[in-house]
Amino acid sequence: SIDAMYEEQASFIEYWLNDDDASFYKLFNPGYTFVDATLANHYGISVSQSSLHKVNTDRNRGGLLHQGLTQIMNSDFNATSLVKRGKMIRENMMCHTMGVPSGVDPATVDIPSTPITTRERWNYVNGPDASDGQCWECHKLMNEPGSSLEQFDAAGKFRTTEQDYNGSSVQLILDVTGTLRDNNADTLMQYDDARELTEYLAASTQGKSCFADSFFRFATGHKSDAYNKEELSGLQGIFNQDDDVKQLIKSIATSAMMRYRVNR
């Protein structure tokens, strides 16, 4: 299934960029994906052919955050990690670099023996009431969006319930609702699941500006600075309007930022 997930992502990106509209929005909300028989069975999708092919999806599949590879790469060995997943969203989709942990060891936190979900377990470790709220100042920016992806287990399978974190056979209903905050911790929106989160971010100025800045850093190998800030800002403004990733790539590649070398 892992190899099939890599193929899913590669085939999706190639199709989205060359045969679809290459919009930033559809990178996360395309309404389709690519599966072979093995991956389709893993995802619970009915298919009539065994080779890798394009299939239409419901709201639980389709787009980078809803692909199994994303879920697996941002999980622990045998459990999900809403902190890793939330950190991935903040840093990769919102360009918000998070600081280092405060040093609280989860193993030293008293966890009740009653049935709890992974999200509830993390609330005891670094939630609003843990460490007098010290941890929550940062973790509310990660745990909340990361919790939306709890609807996918560590193997990338969609689910609506989770086995009790404490090891009993009880199945607990997942809560994947939450609050997305900006980089100043002000509320941006409330969401019911990961799809509502990706629909918001993929349509937002913040999400598109972050993508443009990220691609610029990938293409040039350095951060934006006084030499190129104005030109990059102009390209971000255009991208926020036309939502065309292919055109953004061309514009950055042919810009003065790429054509002229600056001794920094």
Image (tube, helix red, strand yellow):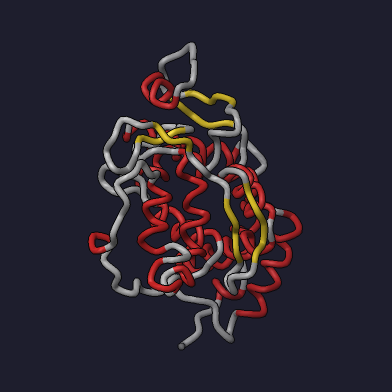
Residue at image location 55% in from the left, 83% down from the top: 225
Residue farthest left in this picture: 107
Left/right placement of residue 112 relative to residue 178 reads left
* Image quarter (top left, top right, bottom left or bottom right) of the N terminus: top left
Q: Is residue 218 in view from this perspective? A: no
Q: Where is residue 171 in the image (x, y as percent from the top left)?
A: 39, 31
Left/right placement of residue 51 relative to residue 256 reads left
Q: Where is residue 6 in the image (x, y as percent from the top left)?
A: 38, 38
Left/right placement of residue 200 relative to residue 147 reads right
Residue at image location 52% in from the left, 43% down from the top: 175
Q: Position of residue 156 (x, y in %)?
A: 40, 36
Q: Position of residue 37 (x, y in %)?
A: 40, 19
Q: Is residue 44 above or below residue 238?
A: above
To which quarter of the image does residue 163 belong?
A: top left
Residue farthest right in this picture: 241
Name the residue nearer the viewer: 254 or 63: 63
Residue at image location 55% in from the left, 36% down from the top: 62
